[in-house]
Amino acid sequence: MKIVVTGGNGQLGRAFQTLAAADIDIQAVDLDVLDVTNQAQVLQYIEAQKPAVVVHGAAMTQVDAAEGIPDKAYRINAVGTQNIAAACLRYGCKMVYVSTDYVFAGDQTEAYTEFMPTKPLNVYGKSKLAGEELARSICPRLFIARTAWLYGDGNNFVRTMLRLGKERKKLQVVNDQTGSPTYAKDLAQAIVALAATEHYGTYHMTNNGSCTWYEFAKEIFRQSALPVTVEAVTTEAFPREAKRPPHSVLRNYMLELTIGDPFRSWQDALTDYLADEKEKGRVK
Ligand SMILES: NC(=O)c1ccc[n+]([C@@H]2O[C@H](COP(=O)([O-])OP(=O)(O)OC[C@H]3O[C@@H](n4cnc5c(N)ncnc54)[C@H](OP(=O)(O)O)[C@@H]3O)[C@@H](O)[C@H]2O)c1
């Protein structure tokens, strides 16, 4: 199975690059080769590659910056997705659009299933939701894979905590936003499994369980044996440009109902990630 991955140099794209399987050929491409906002380039690239599947991971992911430059966010996240969907339609490819928990308001305590209404709070979430709607209206062989709190090879919360944990003895971390941290490697593997099927539709794809950022930080330091005191604070203590959903926990309900939920707990995934980071010399 040949898979083209857009945003190939991002966290998810890099996870795809390291997936080893005899029967898959991964072409992870980034902005310098394939700018998803350039429709002619997208059509030409997909025609030349003839992939069975396009995993569309490219996005403007800077949540706070997007508030000040909404046109850029919509151009990449909505129009870029429209371009990928049109190419998948024209060349008969399956499409996987990677979306986000930020399509929800997070104003309830129950975990979100795929059947619950969306209501994004910020420009990033709105532009990603616009991407979902455009992809649905264009591409019939579509999987939408909503994930959350992603970490892999790139800038992410785990790496930030490990860096700060070495510089400081005490840290303040937000304890009133709850989500499901997800290891990019686990997401890439689950996407490959899903894309091999004909179970088209919208899927929540996160590691199992949930925590607040504060609880996530405590677990990172516990597993890394770093003696850091973590103080729980509210979102108000760290004012940001974009509003965040307070409780955007996703339940992998459609996976449960179709091929089975392959995701492990977020704690086990974190253990694997930290071991992988150590092996690659990224943490000491
Ligand atoms: N990170 C999270 O916590 C999170 C949570 C939920 C959902 N997601 C979704 O998961 C997907 C993967 O996230 P990620 O963490 O891997 O993101 P990432 O590390 O920020 O990677 C996104 C990649 O897309 C590239 N890109 C930006 N504009 C582009 C364009 N016009 N054409 C082609 N490529 C472009 C970026 O290149 P430059 O770096 O050069 O701009 C970057 O390499 C995204 O769709 C994101 O919305 C992420």
Image (cartoon, helix red, strand yellow):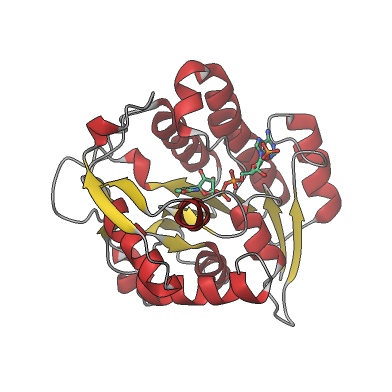
Q: Nearer the viewer, residue 92 or 156?
A: 156
Residue 144 at x, y percent in the picture: 46, 52
Horizontal arrangement in the rendering, residue 128 relative to residue 21 (left or right): left
Horizontal arrangement in the rendering, residue 117 relative to residue 185 (left or right): left
Farthest residue, direction left: 109
Q: Relative to 244, is 232 above or below?
A: below
Residue 281 at x, y percent in the picture: 68, 70
Q: Relative to 72, is 108 above or below?
A: below
Identify the residue at horizontal 53%, vertical 38% (top origin): 61
Identify the residue at horizontal 50%, vertical 65% (top origin): 187
The answer, for residue 2, to whether it is visible in the render is yes
Identify the residue at horizontal 46%, vertical 51% (top origin): 157
Farthest residue, direction bottom: 22
Taking the image as four quarters, which one is ligand 1 found in?
top right
Residue 14 at x, y percent in the picture: 67, 59
Identify the residue at horizontal 82%, vertical 42% (top origin): 33
Residue 52 at x, y percent in the picture: 70, 62
Instruction: Look at the image and tell me in which quarter the C terminus lies.
Output: bottom right
